[in-house]
Image: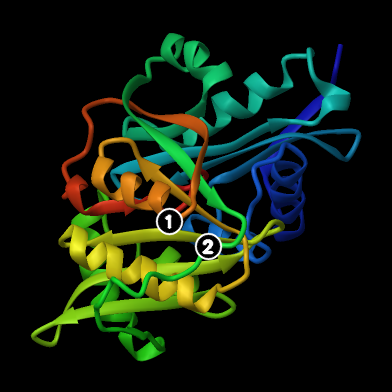
């Protein structure tokens, strides 16, 4: 019988879990662990066997809404039921909240059995050397720390709840933040972060497709000559068509699934999700 300890992970262990995600080919950001843990320090849970991390999960509570990610069992410990132990601990942490996750195809049937219902699919679009389009004309600027409050307020329209603790770190270096304005008010923003392979753009929230394309273009100007990845909801068909025309190729698919009623938000303005791990 395996003797296992279930507990909240230290920062170093969260970094280890994010490293496992890299081993799985998920291509996390190079500075993701700190921002992830800031979202909910109690929401990163591990199973340790003889002091060694065997399985982990992120079960981030945003207050009334939770998100599951980084659900990984180390290959040395698979087949022993340890993954289910951290799953149960994560679900207990989130309680009766509506819970979301982005499930890979191979796990979607398992998530259905646990009460999660598919809502839409997300596709990763990638380009080895994407270039900005001269045809897109839209004024976008870099955002600094003094813009965090207004971006956080804008972000709430496109995410189920306010997530200020997470954004306080997510909007800070080493990530870059691009912001669009109309009449002095934020009407879109995007975050760039370096990953093991190239860079990711996420989130990309905007009040219109024109604003979204302007932000995308501004991001590509910053990332010239770099591989770029964007996780786009399938319902953003026109935006996806633009990506394809710009040299992006559609890659793997995940399904956004919810346990409970899908939360209310302005989904039409979500052109790229923030992360597959935290929603």
Q: Position of residue 193 (x, y in %)?
A: 56, 67
Q: Please state the horizontal and vertical placement of residue 269, each as a whole percent of the image.
A: 21, 54
Residue 232: give its label. none
Q: What SS does tag 1 mark?
A: loop
Q: Is residue 157 above or below residue 253?
A: below
Image quadrant of residue 152?
bottom left
Residue 279 in view here: no
Q: Residue 84, position in %: x, y?
A: 63, 19
Which residue is at a point 21% across and 38% down the rendered structure image? 263
Which of the two discs, 2 and 1, labels the residue nearer the N terminus? 2
Residue 78 as seen in the image, left or right of residue 107: right
Disc 2 residue crowd, few under 14, some 14–19, many 20+, Cα 10 Å: many
Horizontal side, residue 85 vs residue 237: left or right: right
Q: Residue at x 36, y 33 (%)?
A: 99
**Element at label 2:** loop
Name the foreground residue: 279 vs 238. Answer: 238
Residue at the spot of label 1: 246
Q: Residue at x 57, y 30 (%)?
A: 89
The quadrant in which the N terminus is found is top right
Q: Are marks 2 and 1 in contact (CB under 8 Å)?
A: yes
Taking the spot 69% from the left edge, 38% from the top edge, the residue there is 46
User: Residue 80 vs residue 187: left or right?
Assistant: right
| CA distance for labels 2 and 1 | 7 Å
The residue to which callout 2 is attached is 130
């Amino acid at each position: 019988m395996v003797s296992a300890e279930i507990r909240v992970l230290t920062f170093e262990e969260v970094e280890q879990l994010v490293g496992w995600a890299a081993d799985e080919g998920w291509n996390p950001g190079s500075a993701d662990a700190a921002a992830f843990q800031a979202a909910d320090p109690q929401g990163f849970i591990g199973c340790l066997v003889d002091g060694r991390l065997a399985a982990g999960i992120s079960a981030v509570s945003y207050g009334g809404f939770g998100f599951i990610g980084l659900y990984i069992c180390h290959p040395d410990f698979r087949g022993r039921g340890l993954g289910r132990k951290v799953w149960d601990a994560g679900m207990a942490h989130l309680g009766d909240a509506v819970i979301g996750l982005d499930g890979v195809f191979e796990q979607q049937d398992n998530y259905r059995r646990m009460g999660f219902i598919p809502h839409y699919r997300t596709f990763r679009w990638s380009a080895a050397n994407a270039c900005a389009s001269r045809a897109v004309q839209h004024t976008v600027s870099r955002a600094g720390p003094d813009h965090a409050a207004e971006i956080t307020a804008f972000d709430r329209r496109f995410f189920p709840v306010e997530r200020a603790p997470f954004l306080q770190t997510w909007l800070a270096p080493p990530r870059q933040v691009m912001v669009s304005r109309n009449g002095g008010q934020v009407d879109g923003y995007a975050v760039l972060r370096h990953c093991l392979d190239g860079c990711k753009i996420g989130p990309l929230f905007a009040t219109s497709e024109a604003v979204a394309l302007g932000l995308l273009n501004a991001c590509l100007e910053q990332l010239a000559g770099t591989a770029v990845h964007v996780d786009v909801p399938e319902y953003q068909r026109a935006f996806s068509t633009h990506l394809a025309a710009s040299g992006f190729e559609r890659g793997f698919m995940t399904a956004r699934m919810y346990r409970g009623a899908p939360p209310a938000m302005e989904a039409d303005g979500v052109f790229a999700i923030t992360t597959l791990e935290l929603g």
